[in-house]
Structure formats: structure tokens, C-alpha cells
Image (spheres, grey):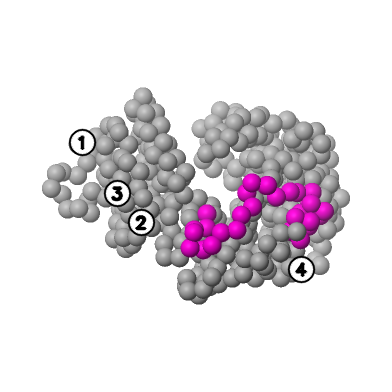
Amino acid sequence: MKVHHSIFDRLVSPESLFSAWEEFKKGKTSRRDVEHFECHLEESLFALQRELASGMYRHCSYSAFTICDPKQRQMHKATVRDRVVHHAVFSVLNPIFEPLFIAHSYSCRKGKGTHKGVDALESMLRKVSRNGTRPCFALKCDIHRFFGSVDHEILVDLFAQRIEDKRIMALLREIVASFSWNGNGKGIPIGNLTSQLFANVYMNEFDQYMKHVLKIPHFIRYTDDFVIISENEGDLRALLPAIQSHLHDRLRLQLHPHKVMIRKFRQGIDFLGYVVLPHHRMLRTKTKRRIFRKLREKEATCARDPLRRESFGQTLQSYLGVLSHANAHRFERGFEESILRQPIMRPSALPAPGSPRHLLRPAAVLAQVFRSSPEHAAQRCLLSSRRSSASAPGLPPASS
């Protein structure tokens, strides 16, 4: 097992901190706290570098707020100064731990993500079921209150197994200890960049157990959600006691009692917002409803503030990207009609009546109204022309 030494100096160098600042500020330059920090950038970063190098750095408290997307989550925001440190830590430590992660861990990793995760699940299901000709079952599990249950001592110990640098371990302890859900030495904040790394390192212990001890060939995980595929339902049931025991004894985690289920492939496997079936892929019903609800909310916001028109276009492009990964022809048509009904779609910017059908596609409309790139519009039209007629039931168009 390779152990890394003397990496602290690289982390706290001025070059590392300025690079971390450049990464952190992307997309945030208009925020008031970021603007204030940038006004005194060199002074602030050199002062931060001195604190880190001398061991005097102390993490500040967090600002808490709640989001609903779709369920209610409590987020915690660190100060700009601390988030620069998070980026510096991530840039140095992530390359060390990334090669240790299994191929089918898809959360917060370069080249992975939700869509790659759903693609991999679909591939596994088709392989085990012999393209839908054999019985196939999926055990789907969710870890109960994962972010609030990460044990600080276990997390630090997992880092210590690979890092023998007292100063960087002291910095990690400071960051880990800066947050606790109930003052019980557990929990990592949702929203920190370091929390993404911490979650992957923590759950990698479970991944290795699944692959190398239980020797499960068809296993996939995204943060606290994981799925196991087998042709035998009894084999999946037999795995549960070992899984529960390892999670509790080694990581102090528990499965969510209401989110452990075994389903047949033909019933559909719900994972990361999509439902995978033998012959097509659907959007989850909650996802479809949320898309229409968000579209209405965004349209209302833009109606009050015309300067937000560009953000409306970005939202539409995001939803078109989600739709492009599912067989949702009927739903997409309803979505298109909803777009064209929006008052924000100025008649002067829309295609003229009698225009060729492809000009009425959402991407073409976006290209004209929001000046989307022609390449994006062409790509979207090509995706639409290739889409299967197999579809998920659509929701009715939103009324304007």
C-alpha cells in the first residue's frame, strides 16, 4: 500500500492557493462575499498562506440555509477564505485517492456523474438478463442520513492510512471537526467541495468490501445509493445481513428501513432520476413534475425581471439535456408546447408560421430567443430525430 509523505508544502504554496482561488471563483464573481474577498485578493491569500504554514489556521463557522430540490435539505456554506482552502486540499488529495476508487462509483468524479451511472446500470441489467430474455433482479438500497452519520474518527483514520504527513493530517482534522450535526463527532456538510472527497473516501471502504470480500460483480454506487444486480432474487436477500453488518460495524452507518427493495427488471429499476426498463428508459414521475413546476417558477421570475431571460434559456437547455438521456417522446412534445406557450417567448423571436417543423424544435427556438450556439441547436435536433417512439406518459402542458 503506497503511503504519501511531505505533501503539505505543496498544498500551502502561494501557487497552490492562487490556483485554488481561480477554480473556486468560476461562476461566482458576481456574489458579494466573493467580490469583497477579491478586492483584497493578494493580501487575503498571503495572510491565509501564513496561517496555514504556521499551523494557526482555524476554520470559521458555517452559514446554514435550506433548499427543496425536490426534498428539503439543509445546506451549509463556508466562508470564501475556507472554501479556497477546501479547493487547495481537494486539488492535492483527490489525485491520491482517485485511483483507489472502484470503476462503478459515480458520484463527484471526473468522467463519471449521474448519466454515466444510469448508462452503466442499464448495461449491467442487459448483461445479466441477456437483453431481457432471462430473469433479472435488482437490490436497491439507500443509507439513512448519510451526510449526518459520517464518523469523524473513522474518516480521519481512512486518510491516515494513506498519508503520513502530520501537518496535512492536522489540517484535515481541523476541516472535519469544523462541522458536526449534533455535536456528536459525526457529519459532513452538504455543499463543501471537501465533503465530496470525504464521502468517496469513506464509502470506498464499503465498495472494496463489496467487490473483494463479497465478490459482487454487478454493483454500482452513487454517494449513498447503491444497486446490486443478480439473476437470483434469493442471492440478493442473502446479501443483506452481511451488508448491514459491515456498514454498522466498520462505518457506523445504517440502511434506510423504507428504501431497501428488490425489483424485477421488467418492473423498472429507479436510479438517479430515471427508471430503466428492458426496452427503454423513462424519466421518474417526480422528475417530470418537478421540471414543469420549475419551468413555471422560472417563467414567473423572468416575467418580473426581464434581465433574467438568459437564465431561463439556460434552464431550458438543462432540461433538454435531461430529456436527451431518456425515451420520452410524448413528454418532450408536451414540454415543447409548454415552452412555446410561455409569455417570455416573444412572438418576434419565434419561427414564422409555416416554418419547417425542425425550426419549431426547442433547440431552434432557444437558438433564436437566447442566442444559443448553432452547434448546440444542431446537436439537439439530431438527438430528437433519433429518439425512439417508445415513451413515458407525458404530463399536460403548463398553462400560461
Q: Which mark is residue 213?
A: 4
Q: Quadrant of the N terminus?
A: bottom right
Q: CA distance from mark 4 to mark 2?
A: 40 Å
Q: Please state which amino acid type lies under the numbered disc 1.
A: Pro
Q: CA distance from mark 2 to mark 1?
A: 30 Å
Q: CA distance from mark 3 to mark 2?
A: 11 Å
Mark 3, Cα crowd under 10 Å, few <14 / some 14-19 / many 20+, is some
Q: Residue at x 70, y 67 (%)?
A: 211
Q: CA distance from mark 3 to mark 4?
A: 48 Å
Say left or right for 38 vs 371.
right
- Mark 2 or mark 1, which is nearer to you? 2
**Residue assigned mark 2:** 391
Tag 3, which secondary structure? helix
Q: Nearer the viewer, residue 289 or 381?
A: 289
Q: Nearer the viewer, residue 355 or 389?
A: 389
Q: Which mark is residue 150?
A: none
Q: Give the residues in magenta.
A: 242-270
Tag 4, which secondary structure? helix
In this orientation, does residue 165 appear?
A: yes
Q: CA distance from mark 3 to mark 1?
A: 20 Å
**Residue assigned mark 1:** 347
Q: Please state which amino acid type lies under the numbered disc 4.
A: Val
Mark 4, Cα crowd under 10 Å, few <14 / some 14-19 / many 20+, is few
Say left or right for 329 vs 131.
left
Tag 2, which secondary structure? loop
